[in-house]
Image (spheres, helix red, strand yellow):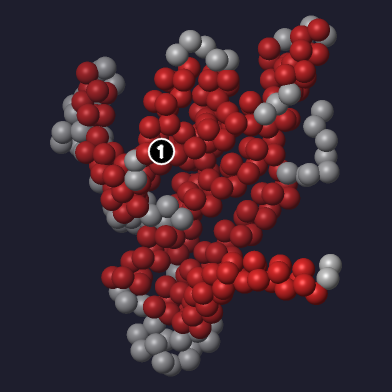
Amino acid sequence: MTKSDRRTALLFFSPAAGFMILFFVYPMFLLVRDSLFDSKTGTEFVGADNYINALTSERFYKSLYNTVIFVIGAVSIELIIGLILALLLSTGFKGSNIARTLFLSPLMIAPLVAGLIWKFMLNDQFGILNSFLFKLGLIDSPQSILWLSDERYALLSCMIADIWLTTPFMMLVLLAGIQGISVSLYEAANIDGASRMQRFWYITLPSLKPVIVVAVLIRMIDAARSFDIIWVLTQGGPNFASSLLSTMIYNTMARYNQAGYASALSILFMIILISICGVFMLRLWNPNKKAV
């Protein structure tokens, strides 16, 4: 590469580099700096005190536990339902285009609006979900289940809303992956007398593995930082039963004005999230391993 080519490459790279420095490197520097200073004054250097306070806080571990349960539960169900819908739509049945449009409709709704919709649906006074369960005879009265104000159901309610909102994304990604599989593989399997389950297990699933890993990884990150739906539905309550790390960080900063502590929580949150995603990729995706 000549000097002229290097200058041209640097010229094209410079806007992206400037963007990264302005909107990522500099904010990260401020975040790390603030985490080392006193939460109230912001001028007194306290070192790792904010991190120690976070790691010894019962509420931090409660929010971390809720975040893990929320991510595992929501993403797992989204993957299963998304895969089933993608396989169904890939058959190309009559009306599949209309069905695909209907399935994708939740993606057109903002998370804040989706949270408001589900807040009304899960309301214990006039919510449609309790009324439906009551008519089916599954509960004694329309007020039997307090979805948003009972510690047993608050996190589950948030998961239900998140699953409804983001399952179409998983379905769309998996459907694109299925349509990218070579038809010749299925034709060869038919000649060999493979059953539908064998074709799925030995052709579809291995071919979809890279797509599944990427889709799950994206959803894990997105679910872990969920805020809009949680805040609209429960605000992390009752008694922190549905508090995630994202809502805890917001409360610490916005309500209690503890910038240093909130910054330390954010740093710990990023470290945990990066570590989990790294382990996930190492365990479930080996690019050098060929599909059977």
Instruction: Residue at 54% x, 69% y: name it.
Output: 19
Q: Image quadrant for the C terminus? A: top right
Instruction: Residue at 31% x, 48% y: name it.
Output: 112
Dot 1, crowdedness within 10 Å: few (<14), some or many (≥20)?
some
Q: Secondary structure at mark 1?
A: helix
Residue 57: give x, y in percent of width and height: 45, 69
Q: Quadrant of residue 118?
A: top left
Q: Is residue 279 left or right of residue 290?
A: left
Foreground pick, 31 / 8: 8
Type of residue at label 1? Leu
Residue 255: give x, y in percent of width and height: 28, 70
Q: Is residue 162 above or below residue 234?
A: above
Res. 67 visible in picture? yes
As drawn, which residue projects farthest toward the bottom?
44
Instruction: Residue at 35% x, 72% y: name it.
Output: 253
Q: Dot 1 corresponds to which residue?
A: 107
As drawn, which residue projects farthest toward the front?
4
Foreground pick, 77 / 50: 77
Instruction: Residue at 52% x, 40% y: name it.
Output: 75
Q: Is residue 109 above or below residue 202?
A: below
Res. 153 visible in picture? no
Q: Is residue 89 left or right of residue 120?
A: right
Residue 201: give x, y in percent of width and height: 71, 22
Residue 279: give x, y in percent of width and height: 68, 53
Q: Image quadrant for the N terminus? A: bottom right
Q: Is residue 278 above or below residue 161?
A: below
Q: Is residue 142 left or right of residue 222?
A: left
Q: Is residue 220 left or right of residue 152?
A: right
Image mark count: 1
